[in-house]
Structure formats: C-alpha cells, structure tokens
Image (cartoon, rainbow, N blue to C red):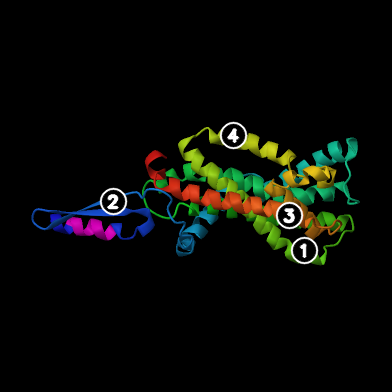
Amino acid sequence: MILELEKSIVEVNLVLPESAINQTETILPGNHVHTVIVPPKGWAPLQLGELWKFRELLFFLTWRDIKVRYKQTALGATWAVLQPVLTMIVFSIIFGGLAKLPSEGIPYPIFTFTALLPWQLFAFALTQSSNSLVGSQNLISKVYFPRLVVPFSSVLAGLVDFAIAFFVLVGLMAFYGIGLTPAVLLLPLFLLLALASAMAVGLWLSAFNVKYRDIRYVVPFLTQFWMYATPIAYSSSLIPEKWRWLYSLNPMTGVVEGFRWAILGKSSLDLFSLGISACAVVALLVGGLYYFKRMETSFADII
C-alpha cells in the first residue's frame, strides 16, 4: 500500500515543469525512494511555451472574465461606451472649450476619443491584471498551471470593450465627415503595443499584490496620474523638444500618438518617440516576466 501511494505521488509530480521543481532522492531502508520537491533557487527560465500548452485554460479564463464583467448588470456592454464618451465630453468642455488646447486641426471630440480608445483598454487591463492573482487565489492554491495565464487572460478580456468603443469612434468620425486612412492597417501593431504595456506593468503589480495587499489602493491613483501624463487631452507637440525623449519613456505616449496617426492621419508619426516608448515597453515586460517567474513558486503559499 505504501509503495503504491509513493508511486502515485511520483506520477502526479511528473506533470510539473522541470523548471518549477528541484528533486532530491534519498534511498530509505527497504529500497524505498523518498523524493523531496523544493522550489528552484535564483532566476527560473521563462518557458513561455507553456502558455500555448495551456491555451484552452487561457481562453476559458478570458471568457470567464468577460461574462463576470457583464453578468447581472443593468446596462451591460453599454458601460464600454459610456465611460469613454462621458470622459470625451468632459475633456471637450474643459480642455477643448475653456482651455482652448490645440487639436492639430482635428475636431476636439475626435482628437480626444481616438486617444481614449487605447487608454481605456490599458487602464482596464492594468486594473484587472494587478488584481487577477488575488482574485483567483482558490484556483492557484489548489492546482498547478502557469500562473502567467491569469494576468494574461485579464488583459485579453479588455478587447471586447475596445471593439465596442472602436465602432463608436467610427460612427463619430462619420458624423464629422472624417474617413479612415490607409494607415489604419497598421493599427493592430499599436494595439499590440498597448496590450504589451498593460501586461508589462500588470505583471509587476500582480506579483506585488500577492504579498502587499495595499497595492490595490495604489492602482487607481497610479492610473489617474498616468492618464494626465499621457497626451490624451492635449497633443504631445506641447512638450518642449528637449524634454520629448523623457516624456516618451511613458509607454502610452507612443501608443496614443500611433493611434492618432493610424486612424486620423493628420500628423506625422514621431518615430524617435515611438522607438523610445517601445524600448520602455520591452524593458518593463522582460523585467516583469522574470520577476513574476521568480515569485511564482511562492504564490500558493502566501496568497
């Protein structure tokens, strides 16, 4: 009976990735083998291929987040429209009407809504991913799967709201007599950059949130501050040239300017600023992935 139990334990342990465990074997009296499983020390390899192996779980968690978002709501998907539209109206009155901020010859509501499109996706993905591990603590503490699946699914769930808001933008552009430009074909690249930005920051915050639960109070303040540090209500041309490189370290600067260029085509794309923003995203994402993997082995213990 003991041998059968030990054999079943070994068979169950074999489903764990080699990078997630270190095994030491001790031969006990009677030729029994005692296996001790301990977490690895140092920096573990990323093994991003595991995300593809668990793609069905990724799809399921994404679909779960989408259903939970709209379940038992009076307005349903209308919330995906109300938030950017109401923000656009407030910005148009205050910044466009009272402050008279320039909008590069574009009607100010369109100028603002085009920037709000990727920003709402980023803000939603950042908030959801930062709380994703804590929200899935029952699942994490009971079964093994790549923990990266959890924040990834939270980020992807925001694409539904983005698609709804995009059709609203197309309707507003038709109302103002503005057509889409051929550069809109490059929009998926800037959309990918927006998702990568949210994922990069979300990985850091989600890992921190497992150990320090007050992170959830920091995220709303961080999101609000970040919005005003991004050229949403104003054009990045207002930033002095000598400080443009520093301003472009904000990953969403390149995303917002890229969206305006791809959809409206009214201003030239600043490749220098876009390159700095892209480099900042890559640095945050790679660092976040390694830190997340380093902390992954302790999530189930302290969550």
Residue 9, magenta (yes or no) = yes
Q: Disc 3, disc 1: CB below 8 Å?
A: no
Earlier residue among tags 3 and 1: 1
User: Residue 268 in the image: x percent, y percent?
Assistant: 84, 57
Earlier residue among tags 4 and 3: 4
Residue at the spot of label 3: 274
Q: Disc 4, disc 3: CB below 8 Å?
A: no
Nearer mark to the viewer, of 3 and 1: 3
Nearer mark to the viewer, of 2 and 1: 2
Q: Which disc, if any, is residue 170? A: none
Residue at the spot of label 2: 37
Q: Secondary structure at mark 2?
A: strand
| Crowd rating for badge 3 (residues with CA inside 10 Å; few <14, some 14–19, many 20+) | many
- Relative height, residue 198 to residue 60 (above, below): above
Q: Disc 1, disc 4: CB below 8 Å?
A: no
Earlier residue among tags 2 and 3: 2
Residue at 83 percent of width and 51 percent of height? 110
* Left or right of 268, for residue 15: left
* Left or right of 222, for residue 273: right
Given residues 188 and 275, the one toward you in this image is: 275
Residue at 87 percent of width and 57 percent of height? 266
User: Residue 232 in the image: x percent, y percent?
Assistant: 77, 45
Q: CA distance from mark 1 to mark 4?
A: 35 Å
Q: Which disc, if any, is residue 184? A: 1
* Left or right of 101, for residue 215: left
Earlier residue among tags 2 and 1: 2
